[in-house]
Image: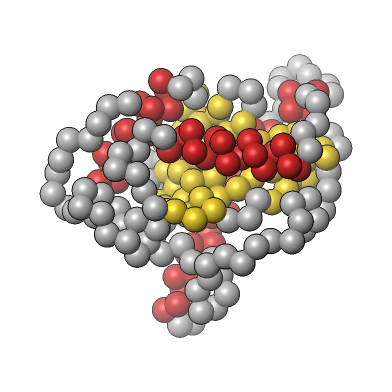
Amino acid sequence: MTQMNQLARSLGVVAAAMALALSASSCSPTAGNPHGSPQSQKALMTPDQARQKLLTLLDDSMSDIKPPLKYWDAWPESSEQDGGYATAAQNRYIMTKVSKAKFGALLGLLERSWKAKGYSIESINPHQPAMFADIPGGSSVGITIGAADNIAFQVVVGPIPDLDSHDAFGIPSPQPTMSNGDPDMIPKYDDPFWSSDQPAATPSP
């Protein structure tokens, strides 16, 4: 296996783990509710409404990060859930290089920011830089830092109609890819603050 394939595989594992954690967080049944999760009791959003909400929540979850980070957004996807509905998820890949020395500052800033916005922190991974939270209204957000120091946010919203994941949001637009065709998640832009190993105070939200 080539070094590029090994890297791509590690990135895929990170993305899959985050999607699984967020899906479980946002769609788990409520104890004593024989009809499934609270999501299935809500009015369905159209794919267009879900897409707009995904982008709004991604922007909101990052709004207190200063200096701002460069990124690109993956195409949204839907995932079938028990109860005859689906959820929609979207990844945002950070392209600003964030030094390992700043991982703690970034996660700490986000934890304070998310709590101030009313998000409920569900888990902070002690073995890998990652954090997941529930958003009021039944949505979820997460941030995971991968083995290649690649950073991804993901937001999950719902419910939407149970449509095929390839059709719910139309034909995907062209997106950055690596030579093997996988999404290009490798940060490449330097930032005087985030890319530096030098400790510095970060603003409080």
Q: Look at 14% across and 44% down and name the residue there.
A: 199
Please, which colouring scheme is shown? secondary structure
Q: Is residue 50 left or right of residue 203?
A: right
**Residue 200 appears at what percent x and percent y?**
15, 40
Q: How many marks?
A: 0
x and y percent of residue 18 in the render?
A: 54, 47
Residue under the point 78% across and 50% down: 168
Left or right: 110 in relation to 204: right
State left or right for residue 31 relative to residue 143: right
Rendered-image quadrant of the C terminus: top left
Q: Is residue 140 left or right of residue 121?
A: right
* Rendered location of residue 174, percent (x, y): 61, 67
The answer to whether one can see residue 30 in this image is yes
Residue drawn at (58%, 22%), measured in percent from left and top? 136
Q: Nearer the viewer, residue 64 or 4?
A: 64
Which residue is depicted at the point 48% across and 20% down?
A: 118
Q: Quadrant of residue 147?
A: bottom left
Residue 36 pos. (x, y %): 79, 27
Residue at the far bottom in the pictured view: 2
Q: In which quarter of the view is residue 55 placed? A: top right
The reply to whether residue 101 is in sight is: no
Q: Is residue 141 above or below residue 164?
A: above
Say which of 134 and 93 sits in front. 93
**Foreground residue, 50 or 42?**
50
**Among all residues in the image, which is located at the extreme top?**
32
Give the answer, above or below, for where 57 lies relative to 78. above
